[in-house]
């Protein structure tokens, strides 16, 4: 079992990582006998885990109600959020309830915002079930729902009381989703930790084989890296921006292709290769490291070029709508050396186009 | 001009109180030239104040957009909240925008929650236009919308950057709404400040005549009293409960009669008299002070008994649904002496019924 603490003063909390955690109600600390809880999940995960998990908690004396939401990013909406409030009020659950999010980033983000705003804030436990949510969205306290006019536009910074990562979940996760999560894993190596990047090169096959020890170490290291960044910059003013390596290009791909056609991690993988090319053109990074990045992404089952249907010029209008555009100037996260990155202001449009063309198949 | 500071560490903020503030864009600190703002108001206030206020701000170089919501408590909903997000995203407004709430407690609570959750939090300025919102809802950082299954069930603790109280607004406020606000004003005297209570006895006529100096002092004193309580207990664990004097009875009246038939302050006024009767039955307070409370409420145009249609027994089921019921035990705020109150646990049902019967016309 791996365990780390996200250090945020009185809002600090533990992340527990191991196989088989769902079988032990003690994993769900600070829930104890007599507590009320509302388990929030989706109709894809419910048949796999809901009965066993709520059964264990009930055996341990926790009063568990459940709400099953429709699966999918399009359901990360105010309307579906309201279904959670209705379920809570129908009982009713009081301010002393605990919301448990069982699912990937969609459920975690939505249930987290429900916890932040139900009666102005109730206790919240994250139980992330995708690799992406285990290494990324469950750490850092960002919660949100989408609006028809923009993704993640309505939300709160709200920290969970604990995060419970049962590695066994990953056995039912589709392979494409696993690869998508690995894109974020590899990202941490590129921007923050060259030693971890090398560890990934040595252990990628074990990760793809879902070998528990390799997985547990990998997830722990990613959570640590993200937790350090978040602790230094909880409200995303500075260093936290580095976590967006590849994301400005990637969002252009996701938006242009329509959400869901390219998974988030797939778009980020291609975007990271583009960022590496932009860095090379600015004389940063090295050809050898650029080669290592592409090779590792390919081994993880990820793309290293954008969609064939998308011309280099198609990226720019989407990229200019990015939150990192300030006064019309594009700011890109670019790698400097392996394990180091920086926010680069004033990247010229033709340089961006060239970096995309470098990656066309 | 009266000015006070609500002291909450790095979230401290000023409250400015004077006649004519709307004519001076400097009142709207920290808004400055070049800033973006979204003015949120309702269709009752818009014809009265919207053009002149946004005109002044534009003259001062602030880029002001506006959203006009339908008036009324029934519009303090997730659906109407979404209209604010749509207006913000249609432009779009970024994280550097400022939301200005121009209205009573309904607009303040809803726009405050919009500010708390738009892009996970943007700057917020309260411009309360009812006496109730000036002395109560604009201080303390509670924001919320209603759910069909419960009032104020969805919200956040979120502090404004400043509160701007223009006394001239009260000239257009219906008299019944003014009286309703006075109920909360008198409440502060009863629970926290006997000297202020006596000042109210001396100055009630000036307040009813909307005499600016009396109003400014009165509002400042109420804001100070509430700010002190909030600073000591931001998240409502202890002392803040005293602010609910009369509210447990009052909510029973509001709910039983249907929202809007009895104004909030009217129900609270009757509820405070009932709480005084309960205190007397427990040997607290004095008959002379009980008489002073009723006399002052009557002068303010407020009821001192419940609705004739409502039997004493009708109150209990509503009261037992109060947030202050813990483990089936009713907890009531009761006055001890003039200027002092306490939370009284385990008040017997027949004592509650008797206190209501004491006040039947
Ligand atoms: N809050 C943050 O800091 C943050 C960071 C990154 C991403 N996000 C958000 O996370 C979301 C993406 O998260 P995601 O990639 O986990 O997507 P997701 O939650 O949609 O999960 C992907 C798919 O896998 C299914 N699934 C989940 N766990 C499974 C399991 N164990 N077995 C079988 N199927 C399973 C889900 O039902 C879904 O169909 C996006 O909405 C994104 O905005 C948030
Ligand atoms: N956040 C808090 O701490 C807190 C505290 C107390 C009450 N509240 C909330 O406040 C709300 C009640 O506030 P309220 O009493 O101000 O009601 P309100 O906002 O509905 O205003 C009452 C009526 O007066 C109108 N009005 C407002 N200002 C006016 C003016 N200057 N001239 C003419 N008409 C005017 C409004 O349009 C409305 O029709 C409730 O929703 C309650 O839950 C919140
Ligand atoms: Zn990502
Ligand atoms: Zn009140």
Image (tube, coloured by chain):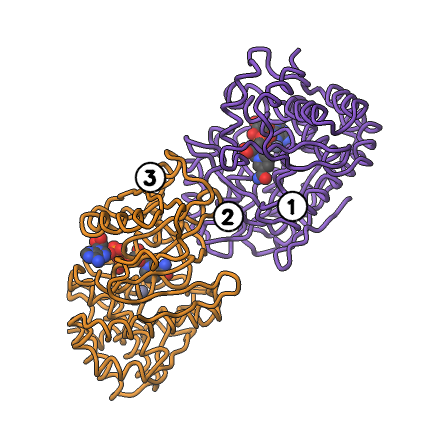
Chain colours: A purple, B orange
**How many neighbours does mark 2 have within 10 angstroms: few (below 14), some (14-19), or many (20 or more)?**
many
Q: Which of marks 3 and 2 is in front?
A: 3
- Give the mark toward the camera: 3 or 1: 3
Disc 1: host chain: A
Left or right: A56 with respect to B152? right
Does mark 2 fall on the same chain as mark 3? Answer: no
Task: Please give the label number shown on residue A115.
Answer: 2
From the viewer's side, name the closer residue of B103 and A279.
A279
The percent position of residue B236, horizontal first and vertical second, equals 46, 65
Q: How far apart are marks 3 and 1 (CA)?
A: 34 Å
- Badge 3 crowding class, 10 Å Cα cut-off, few under 14, some 14 to 19, many 20 or more, is some
Percent x, y for residue B129? 26, 59
Figure check: A14 above or below A194: below
Whether labels 3 and 1 belong to a single chain: the reply is no
* Residue corresponding to mark 1: A163
| Corner quadrant of residue A226 | top right
* Element under disc 1: strand
Sooner in the amino-acid sequence: mark 2 or mark 1: 2
Query: In this rendering, would A361 be left or right of B260?
Result: right
Q: Report if residue A50 is visible in the image.
A: no
In front here: A82 or A248?
A: A248
Q: Does the residue labelled 2 lie within 8 Å of ligand 1?
A: no
Which sits in the foreground, A26 or B28?
A: B28
């Amino acid at each position: 079992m791996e365990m780390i603490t996200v250090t945020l003063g009185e809002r600090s909390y533990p992340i527990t990582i191991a196989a088989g955690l769902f079988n032990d109600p003690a994993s769900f600390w600070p829930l104890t006998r007599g507590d009320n809880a509302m388990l929030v999940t989706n109709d894809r995960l419910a048949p796999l885990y809901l009965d066993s998990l709520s059964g264990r908690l009930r055996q341990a004396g926790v009063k568990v109600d459940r709400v099953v939401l429709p699966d999918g990013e399009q359901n990360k909406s105010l309307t579906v959020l309201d279904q959670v409030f209705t379920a809570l009020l129908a009982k009713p659950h009081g301010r002393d309830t605990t919301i448990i999010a069982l699912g990937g980033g969609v459920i975690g983000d939505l249930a987290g915002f429900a916890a932040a705003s139900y009666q102005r804030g109730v206790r919240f436990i994250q139980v992330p079930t995708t690799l992406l949510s285990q290494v990324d969205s469950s750490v850092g306290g960002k919660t949100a729902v989408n609006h028809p006019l923009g993704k993640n536009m309505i939300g709160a910074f709200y920290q969970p009381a604990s995060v419970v990562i049962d590695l066994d979940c990953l056995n039912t996760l589709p392979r494409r989703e696993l690869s998508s999560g690995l894109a974020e894993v590899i990202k941490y190596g590129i921007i923050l930790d060259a030693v971890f990047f090398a560890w990934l090169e040595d252990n990628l096959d074990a990760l793809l084989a879902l070998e528990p020890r390799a997985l547990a170490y990998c997830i722990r290291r990613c959570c640590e890296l993200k937790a350090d960044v978040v602790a230094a910059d909880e409200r995303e003013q500075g260093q936290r921006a580095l976590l967006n390596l590849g994301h400005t290009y990637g969002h252009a791909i996701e938006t242009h292709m329509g959400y869901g056609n390219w998974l988030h991690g797939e778009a980020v993988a291609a975007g990271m290769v583009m960022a590496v090319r932009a860095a090379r053109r600015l004389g940063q990074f090295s050809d050898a490291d650029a080669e290592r990045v592409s090779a590792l992404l390919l081994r993880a089952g990820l793309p290293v070029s954008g969609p064939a249907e998308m011309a280099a010029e198609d990226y720019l209008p989407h990229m200019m709508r990015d939150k990192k555009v300030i006064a019309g100037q594009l700011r890109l996260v670019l790698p400097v050396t392996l394990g180091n990155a920086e926010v680069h202001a004033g990247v010229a449009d033709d340089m961006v186009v060239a970096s995309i063309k470098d990656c066309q198949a």
